[in-house]
Image (cartoon, rainbow, N blue to C red):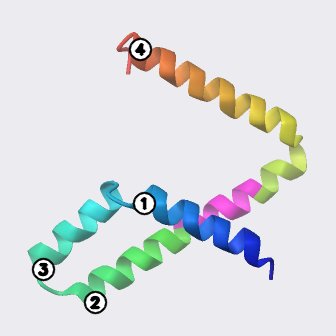
Amino acid sequence: MDWRVFLTTFGLLFVAELGDKTQLTVISLVAQNQNPLPVFLGAVGGLALVTLLGVVFGQAITAVIPMNLLHKGAALAFVVIGVLFWFEVL
């Protein structure tokens, strides 16, 4: 296993998920149900499945589209979304 890739992925996702809507939803569900184990298991299962879909889709798309085009497309998408937010279209 490539531990550098593993630790980078873990660190990035850990920091990105802190305080986001997923964490706030989990906090709310535990407070509402007072039963943390099923909430934890459901959250882990849901996040694992979403991550699996991302990995499978990511591997498939990089087999078809060159990485430099993916980077440019992602950059363009962020710019377009930013402009739409700027002009309050979204």
Q: Amino acid at mark 4?
A: Trp
Give the Cα distance between marks 1 and 3: 22 Å
Is residue 51 covered in magenta?
A: yes
Q: Is residue 23 above or below residue 58?
A: below
Query: What segment is highlighted magenta in the picture?
Result: 50-58
Q: Amino acid at mark 3?
A: Asn
Quarter location, residue 35? bottom left
Is residue 57 covered in magenta?
A: yes
Q: Earlier in the sequence, mark 1 or mark 2?
A: 1
Residue 34: x and y in percent read 12, 84
Provide the residue designation for mark 1: 17
Mark 2 touching mark 3, by CB under 8 A? Answer: no
Provide the residue designation for mark 3: 33
Give the Cα distance between marks 4 and 3: 40 Å
Tag 4 secondary structure: helix
Which of discs 1 and 2 lies nearer the camera? The answer is: 1
Residue 83: x and y in percent read 49, 15
Which quadrant, please, contains the N terminus? bottom right
Instruction: Give whichever of 53, 27 is nearer the camera.
Output: 27
In the picture, measured across the screen, residue 87 lies left or right of residue 62, that is left
Q: Earlier in the sequence, mark 2 or mark 4?
A: 2
Residue 24: x and y in percent read 25, 61
Q: Amino acid at mark 1?
A: Glu
Question: What residue is rendered at 64% in x and 66% in y?
Answer: 9
Mark 1 touching mark 3, by CB under 8 A? Answer: no
Tag 2 secondary structure: helix
Give the Cα distance between marks 2 and 3: 10 Å
Q: Amino acid at mark 2?
A: Leu
In the picture, measured across the screen, residue 89 lies left or right of residue 16, that is left
Quarter location, residue 64? top right
